[in-house]
Image: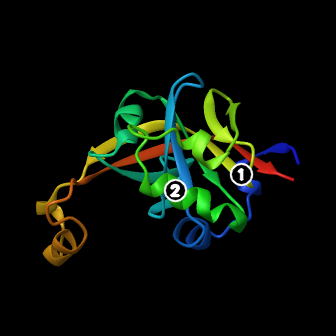
Amino acid sequence: MAFIKKRSGELTCNPFTTIGSEWFLLTAGTPEQFNTMTCSWGAMGVMWNEPSVTAYVRTSRHTFGYMEKAGIFTISVFPEEYRAALSYCGSHSGRDFDKVKETGLTPVTLDGGVGFAEAKMVLVCEKTYGQLMDANDFADSSIAGKFYGSDAMHKLYIGRILAAYVNE
């Protein structure tokens, strides 16, 4: 299989399935030094007249430091047979484990971002906005208690989709 570059308007994925059920790897850093993490929360749509994604990273995650420094990040969506690799990347920290070595995934550079050859789709995104979530801003305070408690809050990142690659 080989990646085909497409315009974001040509994508036919269902964001509710792609993000909530299939999950994705969010990857930030350089081809020489990066980290990836599994996500199942996010959004796809249009922001500031540009096709965009929204991703959330807890400030305690190893990927957070990479996201803070990065101008580019990627969203890699995988076929179901890679569920174990995504589970591993979501339950093991890049501080302690070499996720690429442990999962056998193959990093590839796409437009300055790091994606994975096994992905069925990779979105290359330019970070355009970041905002730390605040427990005091929830309209329903039970949400903060349910999802955070003593855990670190997320930082919301909006990325403009620069390129979409589909593995065909």
What amino acid type is highlighted by mark number 2? Tyr
Question: Mark 2 = which residue?
Answer: 88
**Horizontal and vertical percent for residue 116?**
68, 43
Sequence-wise, the earlier of marks 1 and 2 is: 2
Residue at (68%, 58%) from the top-left corner? 78
| SS state under label 1 | loop
Q: Quadrant of residue 61?
A: top left
Mark 1 Cα shell of 10 Å, populated few (<14), some (14-19), many (≥20): many
C-beta proximity under 8 Å, tags 1 and 2: no
Question: Mark 1 = which residue?
Answer: 119
72 to the left or right of 158: right
Please tell me whether residue 120 is drawn above or below residue 60 in the rendered image: below
| SS state under label 2 | helix
Give the mark count. 2
33 to the left or right of 113: left
In front of the other: 74 or 99 = 99
Residue at (60%, 68%) from the top-left corner? 22
What amino acid type is highlighted by mark number 1? Ala
Mark 2 Cα shell of 10 Å, populated few (<14), some (14-19), many (≥20): some
**Horizontal and vertical percent for residue 119?**
71, 51
Residue at (44%, 37%) from the top-left corner? 128
**Residue mark closest to the camera, 1 vs 2:** 2
Residue at (23%, 54%) from the top-left corner? 153
Q: Is residue 164 visible?
A: yes
Q: Which mark is residue 165?
A: none
**Horizontal and vertical percent for residue 88?**
52, 56
Please tell me whether residue 45 is drawn above or below residue 15 in the rendered image: above
Between the residue at mark 1 and the residue at mark 2, the CA separation in whole angstroms equals 16 Å
In front of the other: 106 or 28 = 106
Q: Quadrant of residue 129?
A: top left
Q: Is residue 161 visible?
A: no
Q: Furthest residue to the top?
A: 32
